[in-house]
Image (cartoon, rainbow, N blue to C red):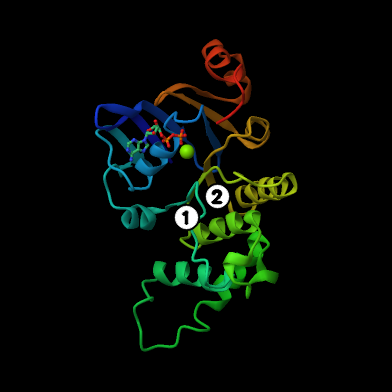
Amino acid sequence: MLSVESVVKSFGGFKAVDEANLRVNAGEIVAVIGPNGAGKTTLFHLLTGHLTPDSGRILFKGKEIGGLSPHVICRRGITRSFQVVNIFPRLSVFENVQIAVLSRERKTFRIFSPVEGMAEEEVHRTLRSVGLFDQRDVESDLLSHGDKKVLEIAVALSGNPELLILDEPTAGMAPEETERCIRLIRKLSRESGLTILFCEHDIALVFEIANRIMVMVRGATVVQGSGEEVRRNSEVRSAYLGESGEC
Ligand code: ADP
Ligand code: MG
């Protein structure tokens, strides 16, 4: 589904992504791990059009997407959540998802039609699938941190993606919120057949839910493989797993 080949991205003279390689097959849950500053978020920005690669290829379903704009990439089937919570705080849970659904359908600017009940069925379905239905009328800012992150996932799902990219989905979550988020990721993969690419600092969690793992150090791919293959890799052990475990 996704193939990243020798992708490079520099800021000034600094190569934040330096020969990254990544393969994601349809239906897989793939994790990117690596120390802080390894280039994970930058790589995700490149995959979703928020940044343009300097060189290398990014193929999604066989077609080059490197350098396309975010909305074009979104229409092709990739959506994402951000490392920092990115929702409209004053709008309700329902409205946040509704805006995402309507913008996918390009209906937001039909200003003379009442927006209130629009897309209600789909919004409700999405909120049920992530477990936020009961909180649909709550102002988003009043949600717990964990629920805000889950709302972000709901917003991303509203784009009807084939590939969902999550940047540190459990960052800042309490243990029980993390547990719930893991169950959600698994459920989305299992029930909707969604392909999921995520980056996460909790290594135990990564080994628990990822089918395959890519390890990134200083912008480059060190190894990509099953949990067992990654664990066995000596470069990973010295460069990363032996360290503090921070992402
Ligand atoms: P990670 O998500 O793995 O922690 P990032 O992709 O956020 O890493 O950052 C990789 C490196 O690139 C870091 O050293 C960061 O400071 C640098 N970087 C990221 N974005 C920019 C930018 N817009 N301008 C300059 N440097 C950046
Ligand atoms: Mg990051």
Residue in the image at 42% along x and 41% along y: 44
Q: Is residue 50 shown above or below 207?
A: below
Q: How many neighbours does mark 2 have within 10 angstroms: few (below 14), some (14-19), or many (20 or more)?
A: many
Image quadrant where one finds the C terminus: top right
Residue in the image at 54% along x and 35% along y: 31
Amino acid type at image mark 1: Pro
SS at mark 1 in the image: loop
Q: Position of residue 125 (x, y in %)?
A: 61, 69
Q: Is residue 64 shown above or below 89?
A: above
Amino acid type at image mark 2: Leu
Residue in the image at 55% along x and 19% along y: 240
Label 2 close to label 1 by CB (< 8 Å): yes
Relative to the observer, which residue lies in front, 175 or 81? 175
Residue matched to label 2: 194
Residue matched to label 1: 161
Task: Tell me the CA gap for discs 2 and 1.
Answer: 8 Å
Q: Position of residue 13 (x, y in %)?
A: 25, 27
Relative to the observer, which residue lies in front, 51 or 66? 51
Number of numbered discs present? 2
Query: If you read the primary sequence from the N terminus, does the residue marked by circle 2 or circle 1 appear first?
Result: 1
Q: Position of residue 131 (x, y in %)?
A: 68, 62
Q: Is residue 123 left or right of residue 114?
A: right
